[in-house]
Image (cartoon, rainbow, N blue to C red):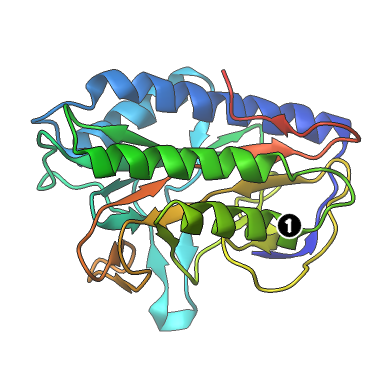
Amino acid sequence: MSGEIIIKTPSEILRIRKASTIVAQTLSYLEKFIKPGISTLELDKIAEDFIFTKGGKPAFKGYTVGNGKEVIKYNHTICASVNEVVIHGVPSSEVILKEGDIISIDVGVIFDGYYGDGARTYFVGEVSPIKKKLSEVTRQALYEAIDMCREGNRVGDISRVIYEFVRKNGFDVIRGYTGHGVGKFLHEAPPIPNYPVGAGPRLKKNMTIAIEPMVVSGSFRIKVLSDGWSVCAVDGKPSAHWEHTVLITDSLPEILTVE
C-alpha cells in the first residue's frame, strides 16, 4: 500500500472513473453466468475476456504480496469467495457452484494506468433466508458508509458506521483486512477498517477510496487457506462482501463503480 494519501487531478479522476465503470460492467456481466455447475475458474476466464473487450486490464493478475522468498503472486483476474470464504478466494476448476451457494466476486481493472475496484455478492439459485439477509445487510452497510464520505469527515466515521450497522443486524466484520485508497495504485493510503480503530485522517476533495464491508454470519475469527490467499471464516459460516470505489467531492460522494 502506498504510504501517502494521493489527491487526484481531474484527468486522473477521468481514468479512474473509466476503470471503475469497467469494474461495474464486469460484475453485472458475470451475473448471468452464476448458476449451478459452473466453476469459479470458468467465471475468472469470462471476466478476463470481458475486461479486455472493454479496453481494460485485470488489476489483480500478477499482484504480489510478501518479501524476498515469501513473495506470493496472484494469478487470476477475479477473487471468487464461496460461502465461508470471505475474501480473496482463488478461482479453481475444482470449485463448482451449487444450488444454495453464496459467492462474492471482487474485480479490479486498470485503464490507462489507473485503477478501479469493486465487489458484489451473488446467490446461486435459491438461497437460505440467512444468506439473503447477510448479503443485504452487507450491501446496506456499504451504502451507509458511502453516505459518510463527505469532505471533512474522518476515516473513522466510515469505520464506525459499518461496524455499528453490521453488529446491530446480528452479524460481524472480520479484522485485519480493510478498505483502502485506490486509483493511482490498487492499494493506497489510507486503510479504511470496517471496525473502529480511532479517528483516522480527514477526507479531502478528490480522494478516491474503496469501501468494502467484509461480513460474517458467525464469529469474526478467520484463517488463510493453504493457497496463501483465501480468507475463510473459521466456524465455516457464510460470509458476504460488497465494495465500491468512491470519489470524495465538495458535496455528495460519487460512486464510480457504476455503469
> Residue at coordinates 9% horizontally, 48% vertically from top-left?
94
> Residue at coordinates 23% horizontally, 59% vertically from top-left?
237
Q: Is residue 78 visible?
A: no
Q: Is residue 188 left or right of residue 226?
A: right
Q: Is residue 159 above or below residue 255?
A: below
Q: Secondary structure at mark 1?
A: helix
Q: List x then y, in percent, for residue 144.
A: 63, 42
Q: List x then y, in percent, for residue 116.
A: 60, 38
**Front in this rendered view, residue 16 or 217:** 217
| Quadrant that contains the N terminus | bottom right
* Residue 227 occupies quadrant: bottom left
* Residue 258 occupies quadrant: top right
Q: Is residue 145 left or right of residue 173?
A: right
- Crowd around label 1: few <14 · some 14–19 · many ≥20 (10 Å): many
| Quadrant that contains the C terminus | top right
Task: Give the residue pinned by disc 1.
Answer: 157
Q: List x then y, in percent, for residue 171.
A: 40, 57
